[in-house]
Amino acid sequence: MQLIDQETTPVIYRDLQRPLPTIVRGEGIYLWDSTGKRYIDGAAGSSAVVNIGHGVPEVIEAMTEQARKIAYVPTHAFSSEPIEACAQTLVEEFAPAGLDKVWFVSGGSEATENAVKIALQYQRDRGKGTKQLVIGRWQSFHGATLASLGYGGNAGRRKKYQGILSTAEHIGPCFPYRHATGDEIEYGLAQADQLDYLIQQVGAENVAAFIAEPVVGATTGAVPATTGYFERIREICDRHDVLFIADEVMSGFGRTGKKFGIDHWEAPPDLIACAKGISGGYTPLGAVLVRPEIVGQVRGTGGSFVIGHTAGGNPLSTAIGKAVLDYTVKHRLVDNAEIVGAYFKEKLVELMAVHPIIGDVRGLGLMLGIEFVADRETKRPFPLELQVSRRIGDATLERGLVSYPGQGTVDGVVGDHLLCTPPLVITKLQIDELIEILDASLHSVERDLRVV
Ligand SMILES: Cc1ncc(COP(=O)(O)O)c(C=O)c1O
């Protein structure tokens, strides 16, 4: 096996601890490494990125054609055809009603941070300059920059930077499997009411925006908020004149079986941060969808948003984004996520009968998660040092399935889960293939842990 040696390579990889195989090709839901070994891309990248699958000819044609014409224009002085076309498709085919303006960036962290900056500038420009605080939720992830880690609530990822993160306040998560003791809807509403309480404590005149993932991805493993939760959040934001930002970086573009994750609730946000599925991994691209009133306010002052990035809205990336979005629409991938996602969830629930370490199966569409426990009755997590999710990730990789393991599910430190977000083009037959590998991998880890 030809593996990259971490000692000798000039590259700094995300995982510095293990030798890495080299992927040389991808097609549909499959990847091949340099030895010819085939893998199912069961997380669609890292993760929920490659929604339309690998090697799609239409996208390759669109990127080649655009690169031949022009790859980059000076965006401070010019528009280009692809930026207009991509924004048009985003607004017409995907955005909830009323989010008609699009700001392009290069990824998810930039998208959430730019959404926050747009919100802050809006508050200042309309004479509400004291509204500077952003409220997020514990057990959430909004990006890896210092600002996004600050309003994010992933304890494990924040720890190394404590003391220098951007200032933000947090309310508790909406995580019924771990915290609801009675009726889940009542629990969810009480969790949402924490926002009302916190805004009253710090003063509404100081709060600019609230940011949340409709379905929490990397931190807890596909946990959707409960019924009624975001409607209550919307009411609270309206009552206190606070903007609501939905972080759809992972849950957007059909991932949850609807266009955006927030579409599962009647709670239209003021801004949406998105990335990943917008360009399906074919190029780095992200966007912020914004209510026109917000843009109008800033424009009305005679100014512009002070947030530009060099690569934002370049013609090559937006042409690729447009081709990926067109493919998503043409092949009805939002519907496929709902239908095949329901089948996948059923199969994962069936695995619970034979695998005692599965504590919970959850999620929407093809954004599913499995939480692992040492004891199903008490929901006791495995000790951190057993590295259970990592072992499961290694076991699936060995058998030809790329999964996305996560730790810190319970409180940011302990707890194990697997995020199951295959490409939206996956078929039921391919789900069976994936389940077979996952089943064998879980058996092998359970034998190691002497659980069975
Ligand atoms: C919900 C959410 N927001 C933001 C981000 C950050 O995106 P990026 O890694 O593209 O910066 C991620 C990445 O996984 C995410 O899942």
Image (cartoon, rainbow, N blue to C red):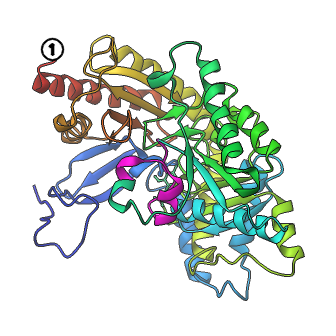
User: In which quarter of the view is residue 120 placed?
Assistant: bottom right
Q: Is residue 440 left or right of residue 98?
A: left
Magenta-colored stretch includes residue 142: yes
Query: Is residue 283 visible to us here?
Result: no
Is 151 above or below relative to 30? Answer: below
* The N terminus lies in quadrant: bottom left
| Residue 197 on the magenta span | no
Distance from mark 1 CB to nearest ligand 1 atom below 8 Å: no
Above or below residue 339? Residue 74 is below
Residue 25, image x, y percentages: 32, 58
How many marks the image carries: the answer is 1
Residue wearing tag 1: 452
Q: Residue at x 14, y 65 (%)?
A: 6
Q: Position of residue 178 (x, y in %)?
A: 44, 24
Q: Residue at x 59, y 83 (%)?
A: 72
Q: Which quadrant does the C terminus fall into? A: top left
Residue 439 spot, x, y in % from top left: 26, 24
The image quadrant of residue 358 is top left
From this view, report whether residue 21 is shown above or below residue 446: below
Span shown in magenta:
139-157
Q: Residues within 10 Å of mark 1 (few under 14, many from 20)?
A: few
The answer to whether one can see residue 304 in this image is: yes
> Camera-side residue: 436 or 123?
123
Question: Which SS class for mark 1?
Answer: loop
